[in-house]
Image: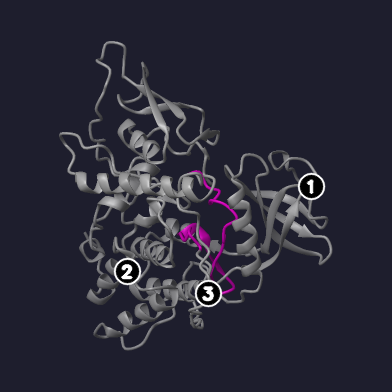
Amino acid sequence: MQSSLDLAPDSVVGGRYRLIESLARGGTASVWRAEDTEAGSRVAIKILRDEGVDPTLRERAGREAHVLEGLEHPNLVRVLDSGEDDGMPFMVMELLDGSSLATIISERGTLDVDEAVTLVADVADGLGAAHARGVIHRDVKPANIVCHDQVPTLVDFGIARNVDATTLTRGLVMGTASYLAPEQAQGMPLTPAVDVYALGCVLYELLTGAPPFVGDSPVTVALRHVQDEAVPPADVADVPAAVNALVLRALAKDPAHRPTDGAALASELRAALQSDPGDETVTITPVSPDGTMVMPAVVAAPDPDAELIDPSPLPPVPPPAKRPTSDVPWPLILGIVVAALVLLLLVRAFGSDPVDVRSVPDGLVGSKVADATAYLEGAGLEVDVNDVESDQPAGTVIGLEPGEGEPVAVGGTVALAVSSGSGDETPATTIAPPPDDGTGDGGDRPARGRGKKGD
């Protein structure tokens, strides 16, 4: 079989899955609509790239697929098969017909409180079943929730990073910037609390029309998850006090302060609805214009002996270096640096370095040089900044060498081409704050205005 980079319609994977059309593609994986030639049915197949992929990712993909194949829940996509074809791991899933929650949000803007909380509680039920089996999703977001057969269904349990263009490269962190838990953005070991945080971001967006943190690049947004506190949703929209408090708890910086897993979040969401005056019952309402309904799902009991499947630890990502206009505390920066050095010493003492080669991340082109430099240096890479005249704002990264997605050794150098503005301007060495035009969010679509309802 040809390289995964050359996959085309009519290619056959695993001896039985004939590719029909590409649904999505990214730096480490692609998703295809396919035909199961033995069963005569349509499926979705996700294929890991066969070149330049960390071996530990391949091993984790096989373990996760094996667990998911035996997981049945109405709010989780079913994994039908998995395997490897000429060195390319693949996962076969049911093909869902319906609109993603991202599409519904783009069409409707916001959802009513009862509708939004009920929908998210159902998805949390599915996450609870996955958490009980030791599986962490790591990329919960509206684009990965499909309203299918009257039920919101969580998809894309990952072989690799999500395949859309705004997802940060797997070599540094896994997940999509707008829904990234602070510990996930820093490359720390993960627990089910990262999925609780991401689902809290989804509920925040359903209630207010935008995720809790926006910015002009994925790197900027990831840093905001680490440093900034979210504006309470009740300050942006008409949100009851109990729901407002639970959303903020789901977005706590410390994972120990969030609901412990999906099942706990689902239970607390339904309790928050019932605690508000006048909301004695939970109304089941359509989640899309064509009348799709959200139905209650069963909460799975957690298995205390389950082994959590999470990414191998990676060096923490420090905030940007302190500048005259910055309020980043130096103790935080020092703590992150010390943690990274300790991790490096432990790895060298007890085994070979599992992440000695990385991929240059996507999303750095267009970001501020200070953010790009902090992110790369926090991942163990050297940075060489070169000023280049261009029509881009001064201080904007306009190119990289090696390029995005290309391999680079830990300790290696990434050269940044940085705009110095027009030829008669002084090359920029510090970055001015970007204009507040309300358009950039680092996610899948422009950020929406945040006035209260009725304003």
Mark 2: few, some, or many residues within 10 Å (few <14, many ≥20)?
Answer: few
- The residue closer to the viewer here, 419 or 100, is 419
Lower sequence index among marks 3 and 1: 1
Q: Does residue 442 appear anywhere in the picture?
A: yes
Name the residue rendered at 76%, 46% in the picture.
9
Q: Is residue 397 left or right of residue 38?
A: left
Tell me the amino acid under the disc marked 2. Answer: Ala
Q: Which residues are magenta?
A: 137-166
Residue 133, compared with residue 366, is above or below; it is below
Tell me the amino acid under the disc marked 3. Answer: Ala
Furthest residue toward bottom: 280
Q: For marks 3 and 2, give the CA distance.
A: 19 Å
Q: Secondary structure at mark 2?
A: helix
Query: Label 2 belongs to which residue?
Result: 256
Res 451 → quadrant: bottom left
Q: Secondary structure at mark 3?
A: loop
Query: Label 1 belongs to which residue?
Result: 11
- The residue closer to the viewer here, 307 or 429, is 307
**Rendered location of residue 240, percent (x, y):** 25, 74
Furthest residue toward top: 424
Residue 383, compared with residue 390, is above or below; it is below
Name the residue rendered at 57%, 61% in the picture.
157
